[in-house]
């Protein structure tokens, strides 16, 4: 039993979240505990509910059951903009830049309601140095990777306590993805906690300190990357019963045992 | 020479129409609300000005100092309550709600102020006077003043939207209100501010119209709303300078129509309106080339 202690106070916690999209049960009793300073990766195939989970955590979806806790406080009913001001900041899927605003203006909107902290436009310019001379360009003229960088910069300027990254790699060339994930240590140095969603499992395993696999809205695997085998991940990702070492459809990690109430299902 | 005069008069009246139109355009551009009570609110502003002048004896030209903030506050309040709750249901609901608001305002004004028309009497030589160029061109100081006010308002709006913190937020929310929420912006508050700005411009429009012509409870929908619509459509939605161009084109068309036959004034304006709608439905000036 290494690393995660169940006694440590999580920065961000979801308890038995159930989320519906109309009739569809998109998330089925999902729980997670993100500890301070951690890189927590949620992996899963298309439609597993990863983005729904992040959107529920930031308040863009209301759960039908369950709760979201931030720093020990229940924020389930808090409006998304209040959560952002408290330090839960999402880089949304598809980047969602403000199309009629310039690069600089996008960053300034991100800084408008910032908490006090280390990130200012200067720091973002240092991390992505091309932004300095192209600050007055409309974001529509940027490449996908550059747009992603602006989206990350915009989120960092809010000085988040926990940064949520939704599918950074989507639609980007592998080299660009590498470069963006290469920035992660620099971001973590400032004391941030990261919760990310990734379809690219190998990428997630490389950067994460904890992984959590979703399949059709349910948790199928949880643990430290070092403690799970490739076979287990594959089984949990695709839901192949019997492909993993265990007989059941739910593969338990050999590391930190999952909370009891969850492994019942 | 009479034709030159008609064009000059048309251009100057265009400033007044732009003053009506820019608030309508702003509310549609940001909230996607077509405010059918827009014209009636201008009339309300005019009546408030009449009341303020009667009670405080403030110089007529300075009445805007009180009326504009009052209308801006009313705009914020209406947006945060009535219009927002309609928006939460659907964009179509806002049409019905603002139409209802228009009916209520019109009948309220009839009830309390009767159907008699009244103007904002200025009594100032500066306002009632005119100067002449040659024998046929006569330019009213008031119309020139209104045109100048319209240009200043549009310049101010442009500066506000492009440079200020709230202007930036308004554009961000208009682009993607969910992404703005993720940046910590309460879009309902930002909508309220946009509505306050729109109502401030409509207040100026109402006062200007009250000085230029006469106000009665039906002026709002009969005249102001229709002219504002036409100016916005001709100029191009979402473009500030497009509203000025739209107002000017409408004004010139009306004056030329009147020159041909006095009863063709309105008809000529709407013919241009329909021609633009058919040939260039996006308006004469479009805001963005891409996206």
Image (tube, grey):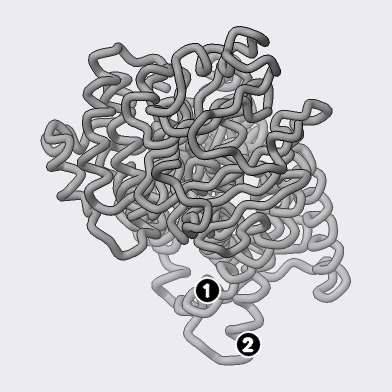
Give the secondary structure at mark 2: helix
Q: Residues within 10 Å of mark 2 (few under 14, many from 20)?
A: few
Q: Which badge, 1 or 2, is on the more N-terminal residue?
A: 2
Q: Is residue B272 above or below residue B194?
A: above
Q: Where does the image place residue A187, in percent across and percent down from the top left? A: 25, 43
Q: Where does the image place residue B76, in percent across and percent down from the top left? A: 60, 64
Residue at 65% in and 9% down: A242
* Residue sitting nearer the eye, A74 or B29: A74
Q: Residues within 10 Å of mark 1 (few under 14, many from 20)?
A: some
| Quadrant housing the C terminus of chain B | top left
Q: Where does the image place residue B121, in percent across and percent down from the top left? A: 58, 76
Give the secondary structure at mark 1: helix
Q: Where does the image place residue B270, in percent across and percent down from the top left? A: 64, 30
Residue at 24% in and 52% down: A190
Q: Which residue is mark 2?
A: B54
Residue A249 seen anywhere in this rendered image of the structure: yes
* Residue sitting nearer the eye, A243 or B247: A243
The chain ID associated with circle 2 is B
Residue at 79% in and 63% down: B105
Residue at 80% in and 48% down: B99
Of labels 1 and 2, the one closer to you = 1
Q: Which residue is mark 1?
A: B69
Q: Quadrant of residue A151?
A: top left
Q: Is residue A138 above or below residue B193?
A: above
The chain ID associated with circle 1 is B
Residue B148 seen anywhere in this rendered image of the structure: no
* Residue sitting nearer the eye, B157 or A130: A130
Does A212 sit left or right of A21 as displayed?
left
Q: Quadrant of residue A241?
A: top right
């Amino acid at each position: 039993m290494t690393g995660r202690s169940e006694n440590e106070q999580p920065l961000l916690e979801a308890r038995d979240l159930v989320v519906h999209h109309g009739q569809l049960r998109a998330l089925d009793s999902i729980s997670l505990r993100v500890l301070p300073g951690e890189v927590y990766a949620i992996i899963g195939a298309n439609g597993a509910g990863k983005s729904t989970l992040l959107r529920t955590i930031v308040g863009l979806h209301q759960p039908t059951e369950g709760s979201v806790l931030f720093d020990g406080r229940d924020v389930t009913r808090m409006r998304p903009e209040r959560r952002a001001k408290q330090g839960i900041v999402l880089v949304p899927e598809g980047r969602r830049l403000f199309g009629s605003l310039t690069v600089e203006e996008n960053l300034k909107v991100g800084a408008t309601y910032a908490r006090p902290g280390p990130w200012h436009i200067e720091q973002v310019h240092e991390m992505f140095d091309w932004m300095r001379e192209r600050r007055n360009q409309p974001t529509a003229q940027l490449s996908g990777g550059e747009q992603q960088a602006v989206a990350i910069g915009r989120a960092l300027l809010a000085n988040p306590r926990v940064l949520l990254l939704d599918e950074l790699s989507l639609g980007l060339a592998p080299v660009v993805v590498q470069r963006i994930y290469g920035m992660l240590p620099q971001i973590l140095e400032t004391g941030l906690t990261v919760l990310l969603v990734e379809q690219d499992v190998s990428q997630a395993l490389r950067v994460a300190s904890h992984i959590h696999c979703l399949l059709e809205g349910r948790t199928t695997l949880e643990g430290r990357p070092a403690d799970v085998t490739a076979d287990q991940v594959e089984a949990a990702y695709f839901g192949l019963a019997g492909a993993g070492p265990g007989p059941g459809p739910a593969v338990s990690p050999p590391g930190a045992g999952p909370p009891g109430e969850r492994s019942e299902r | 020479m009479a034709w030159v005069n008609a064009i000059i008069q048309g251009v100057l009246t265009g400033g007044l129409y732009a003053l009506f139109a820019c608030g309508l355009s702003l509310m549609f551009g940001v909230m996607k609300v077509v405010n059918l009570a827009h014209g009636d609110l201008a009339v309300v502003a005019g009546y408030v000005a009449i009341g303020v002048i009667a009670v405080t004896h403030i110089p007529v030209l300075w009445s805007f100092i009180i009326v504009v903030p009052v209308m801006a506050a009313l705009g914020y309040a209406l947006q945060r309550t009535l219009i927002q709750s309609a928006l939460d249901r659907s964009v179509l609901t806002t049409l019905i709600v603002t139409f209802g608001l228009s009916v209520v305002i019109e009948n309220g004004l009839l009830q309390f102020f009767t159907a008699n028309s009244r103007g904002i009497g200025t009594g100032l030589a500066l306002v009632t006077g005119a100067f002449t160029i040659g024998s046929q061109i006569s330019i009213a100081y008031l119309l020139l003043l209104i045109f100048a006010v319209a240009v200043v308002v549009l310049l101010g709006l442009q500066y506000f939207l492009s440079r200020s913190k709230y202007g930036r937020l308004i554009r961000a929310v208009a682009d993607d209100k969910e992404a703005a929420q993720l940046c910590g912006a309460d879009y309902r508050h930002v909508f309220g501010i946009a509505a306050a700005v729109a109502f401030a411009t409509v207040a100026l429009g109402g006062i200007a119209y009250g000085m230029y012509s006469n106000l009665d409870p039906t002026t709002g929908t009969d005249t102001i709303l229709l002219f504002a619509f036409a100016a916005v459509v001709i100029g191009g939605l979402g473009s500030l300078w497009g509203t000025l161009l739209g107002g000017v084109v409408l004004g010139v068309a009306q004056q030329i129509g009147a020159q041909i036959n006095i009863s063709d004034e309105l008809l000529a304006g709407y013919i241009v309106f329909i021609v633009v709608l058919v040939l260039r439905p996006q308006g004469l000036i479009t805001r963005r080339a891409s996206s």
